[in-house]
Image: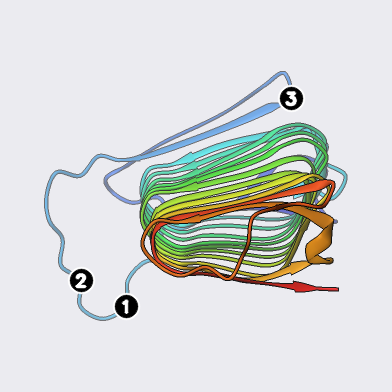
Amino acid sequence: MAKKAKAAENVSKATIVYYVPQRDDNVNISEANGKLTFERKDTKNYISINFGSVQDTSTEIVLPADFKGTIDATDKSGSMSVNTLEKLDGLKLHNSSGSLMLENVSVLSDVEVVCSSGSLFIEKLDVAGNLTLEEHSGRTSANNIVVTGDFSAKTSSGSSEYSNTTIAGTFSVNGSSGSINCSRLESNDISVENSSGSIKLEDVSAKDSLYAKNTSGSINCENIDAGKTITLKNGSGSIKGTIAGKESDYSILSNSKSGSSNLEDSRKGEKELNVSTGSGSIKIEFED
């Protein structure tokens, strides 16, 4: 079933606007000490076949426009959507099977989002704390993100994209299978690791260090920059792209065990550039 949470001007407290009780639903609603709890379980033990229209089983929870509390939502089967909420005290979302969408939300503390099976979409999220994302099977798309703490994302199977993102602390992404694309990203420290699939970095800047490591697949970068250190490592696959600044800005250490490299080792600059690949070519250009 689908679950939605959003703010509205015409309600004074957290309200369940509608839900459609099914014959086999077990619904429990309680309110105590300013906390609204809604639990719905499907207890059917048979297979149903429907012809024609299908009855809506979604649940929508509408919150006051000035709601400043905490949302803790879990959905075992069905899509989940949270949108248009400002200055929440906390946010924790867990979805076992189905898509999860988070749009136009700001939170005054840590945020945790877990999607086990299904796509994860985030558009315009401000977090005054740490942001943790976990996607086990499905696509991840996160755009227009601002985080005052650390950003940590873990994906098991599926592509992931992060764009127009500003992180005050550390930006860390770890993928097992699928491409990782980061664009227009700023952070103090950046770490992107992938086991199988490409890594693409475009207009990515780190105040201190930028680290990208791939086990199998290409690393492509365009206009990347770091205040102190850039490290690009690949087990099997090429490393190509452009780095902001002059070649003389960097002390360079390059190693390609099986493949060509256009970089020469040097100790000229104050910054460090370390590029290595086990099997594949290296081609890095500098943009002054």
**Above or below, 61 relative to 141:** above
Residue 273: x %, y % from top left = 68, 52
The residue labelled by disc 3 is 34
The residue labelled by disc 2 is 50
Spatial CA span between label 1 and label 2:
8 Å
Q: Kindly give the residue lying farthest to the bottom in the view shown.
A: 52
The residue labelled by disc 1 is 53
The amino acid type of the residue labelled 1 equals Ser
The amino acid type of the residue labelled 2 equals Asn
Mark 3 closeness class: few <14, some 14–19, many ≥20 residues within 10 Å: few
Mark 2 closeness class: few <14, some 14–19, many ≥20 residues within 10 Å: few
Q: Secondary structure at mark 2?
A: loop
Spatial CA span between label 2 and label 3:
40 Å
Residue 154 as seen in the image, left or right of residue 33 = left
Residue 141 in view, yes or no = yes
Q: Of residues 38 and 185, which is closer to you in this image?
A: 185
Q: Of residues 168 and 243, which is closer to you in this image?
A: 243
Q: Are marks 1 and 2 in contact (CB under 8 Å)?
A: yes
Residue 238: x %, y % from top left = 45, 68
Residue 77: x %, y % from top left = 36, 49
Spatial CA span between label 1 and label 3:
38 Å
The amino acid type of the residue labelled 3 equals Gly
Point out the image quarter for the C terminus.
bottom right
Q: Of residues 192 and 230, which is closer to you in this image?
A: 230
Which of the 4 image quadrants contains residue 229?
A: top right
Residue 32: x %, y % from top left = 66, 20
Q: Which badge, 2 or 3, comes first in the chain's sequence?
A: 3
Q: Secondary structure at mark 3?
A: loop
Which of the 4 image quadrants contains residue 142?
A: bottom right
Q: Secondary structure at mark 1?
A: loop
**Above or below, 64 relative to 110:** below
